[in-house]
Amino acid sequence: MKKRNILTIAVLLITLMVHSQQPSAEAKVLLDKTYASFETSKGIRLTFRAATLGSDGSEQAAMEGTAFIKGDKFRLETNQMDVWFDGSTQWVLMKEVNEVNISSPTQDEITAVSPLALLGIYRNGYILTAPVSKTIHSRQVQLIRMVPAVGNMEYKEVEAAIDQKSHTLVQVTLTMQNGSKQRIDISDYNANHNFADGDFRFDKNGHPNVEIIDLR
């Protein structure tokens, strides 16, 4: 997948942590509990499977990886690339070409990759529907549908499935304005880690033969 699709995972991981102009009260309570688990944790590790869906719901492209999250810092590891973001600097390791791009994102770019920054976009941008009970991957979840309050949002619809007992994210499905869909399935969620800030910075000593391109 392209770099943008990789970084979209960060969007997917935070999309459920939103507030709405006209929320379902029950949905808001559930989302607040889910957000609190991210906010209070010193480190979250989870595995994910990201897929583009065909019109019949079948997977047409898929990617698996691991995400590490601490506040506005995160690290993504996939077969194609690894991404580090320490809150100000971003490193993207393109494994196929053995190259790292370093950048200092603008505020808009930070919003596109930082979970906490994304809160500013979605806090007042979506209307939440009341949760609906459903079974996904043999787990009982509450499915919350989100639709934009205005018509110029990037996503036409967002569906977030949250585990009824643990209040952790199980699945997110994004419907783009052009009708295409992306789905993220999340497993092995563990919020008991204690990550150091250095875990979210690229270590060039650990990658001695990588070409470094500084775009700052």
Image (cartoon, rainbow, N blue to C red):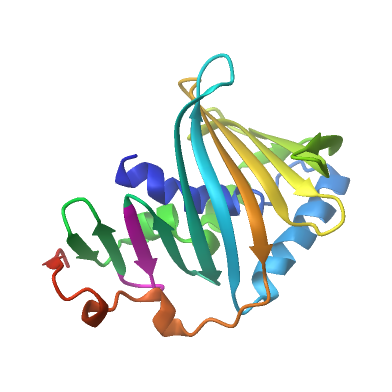
In the displayed structure, would residue 20 be above or below residue 32? above
Q: Is residue 29 magenta?
A: no
| Residue sitting nearer the eye, 70 or 22 | 70
Quadrant assignment for the N terminus: top left
Asked whether residue 153 appears in the rendered view, the answer is no
In the rendered view, does 25 fall on the left or right side of 117? right
Q: Where's residue 44, x and y in %? A: 60, 69
Q: Position of residue 110 (x, y in %)?
A: 39, 60
- Rendered position, 72 above or below 99: below
Vertical placement of 210 versus 193: above or below?
Answer: above
Residue drawn at x 63%, y 41% as measured from the top left = 172
**Residue displayed at 53% across by 50% down:** 121
- Tell me which segment is drawn in magenta: 81-89
Is 31 displayed left or right of 205 in the figure?
A: right
Residue 111: x %, y % from top left: 43, 56
Q: Is residue 190 above or below residue 142?
A: below
Q: Which sits in the foreground, 81 or 103?
A: 81
Q: Quadrant of the C terminus?
A: bottom left
Give percent across and percent down for residue 22.
Answer: 76, 41
